[in-house]
């Protein structure tokens, strides 16, 4: 994950001004909350997580199709 410095927010600022953190996440796609100057938490828009899950599901299907095509002969023998 590439982190833009504009996405970084301290824990103190997140506690005191959560609406700013939410605005950063809306504008930049994510906000990284630092605790003791170390990235600790990431705030994403919920719809972005849904898109990520869909991409992961599609990746699984692509791998499955590739393996089935590669091992077609073995699957045909097993199907008998």
Image (spheres, rainbow, N blue to C red):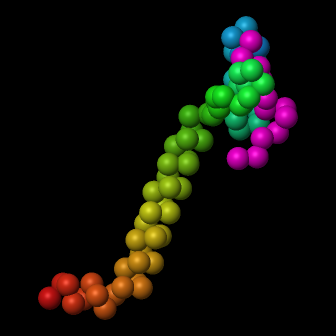
Residue toward you, 73 or 37: 37
Q: In this view, does 33 lie to the left or right of 6?
A: left
Q: State the image quarter where residue 35 is shown.
A: top right
Q: Residue extending furthest right?
A: 5
Residue visible at 76% across and 46% down? Answer: 2
Q: Is residue 13 on the magenta stretch?
A: no
- Front residue (pair 73, 44): 73
User: Residue at the spot x=84%, y=32% of the render?
Assistant: 6
Q: Visible in this render: residue 21?
A: no
Return the x and y of residue 14 as percentages of the image width and height.
Answer: 71, 16
Q: Point out residue 29 in the picture as x, y percentages from the top left corner.
A: 71, 38
- Outermost residue, top side: 16
Please identify the quadrant where the C terminus is shown: bottom left
Using the image as rendered, state which of residue 1 and residue 53 is in the foreground: 1
Give the vertical position of 26 relative to 59 (above or below). Answer: above
Question: In the rendering, at what x and y percent does residue 30 appear?
Answer: 70, 35
The reply to whether residue 28 is in sight is yes
Q: In this view, does 72 lie above or below 31?
A: below
How many marks are shown on the rendered structure?
A: 0
Left or right: 13 with respect to 71? right
Q: Residue furthest left?
A: 80
Question: Which span is picked out in magenta?
Answer: 1-12
Taking the spot 71% from the left edge, 25% from the top edge, the residue there is 33
Residue at 45% x, 57% y: name it.
57
Q: Quadrant of residue 65?
A: bottom left
- Give above or below for 68 relative to 10: below
């Amino acid at each position: 994950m590439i982190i833009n410095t504009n996405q970084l927010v301290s824990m103190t600022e997140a506690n005191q001004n959560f609406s700013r953190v939410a605005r950063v996440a809306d504008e930049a796609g994510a906000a990284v909350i630092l605790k003791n100057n170390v990235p600790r938490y990431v705030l994403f828009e919920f719809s972005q997580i849904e898109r990520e899950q869909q991409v992961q599901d599609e990746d699984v299907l692509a791998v499955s199709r590739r393996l089935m095509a590669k091992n077609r002969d073995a699957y045909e023998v097993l199907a008998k």
